[in-house]
Image (spheres, helix red, strand yellow):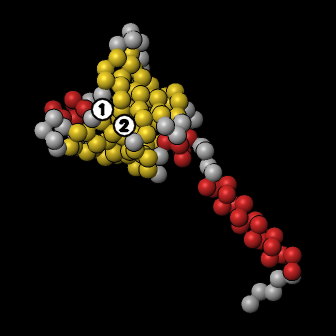
Amino acid sequence: MAIYKKGQLGAIALLLFLMNLFVACDTSDNKKIEGKWQLRRLETADTIIQKVDSVFYNFQKGSFSANCLLFNGGYESFFGNYILQDNKISINLLPEYQGYIYDKYIGWKDWQRTFMINDVSSTSLLLQYADTIYVFRRY
């Protein structure tokens, strides 16, 4: 059994409290981007806006899924992983996805896409690929 002097126990407790506080208050893009996001619209450089409400991106500790609500009331999910680096996010889907539903809702060639992160907050996420901006809200 370890024996601590009177002031050491308080200092250790304070140190543990501060460590927990720093971890809990992590505001890095890693923590901000985690969770479920609903795609609301696509904006192009020509200011063409396409409203969307049936696609959801989920980010959780390197794991990614896209859930797409179908017209018949069902849904389709696509799984993969993601990597954050600086102001970019690279998403890699499993290569077995193909067909009409994949093309309509996702449609990435080679099952991967790297987005620029234009903005991320507690309520909104703006990703850009080429000249298209993907506008999400936290769901």
Q: Are marks 2 and 1 in contact (CB under 8 Å)?
A: yes
Question: What is the quadrant of residue 98 in the picture?
Answer: top left
User: Which x, y percent locates residue 68?
Assistant: 25, 39
Residue at image coords 80%, 73%: 10
- For residue 77, say whether it is visible: yes
Question: What is the quadrant of residue 96 in the picture?
Answer: top left
* Helix, strand or loop under label 1: loop
**Residue with the most extreme left position:** 72
What mark, if any, has residue 53 been given in the picture?
1
User: Which x, y percent locates residue 112?
Assistant: 35, 35
- For residue 90, say whether it is visible: no
Residue marked by disc 2: 38
**Residue 39 vertical position relative to residue 23 in the rendered view, above or below:** above
Q: Is residue 50 left or right of residue 35?
A: left
Question: What is the quadrant of residue 139 in the picture?
Answer: top left
**Residue with the most extreme top position:** 46
Q: Is residue 23 left or right of residue 10?
A: left
Looking at the rendered structure, the kind of residue marked 2 is Gln
Residue at image coords 52%, 40%: 122
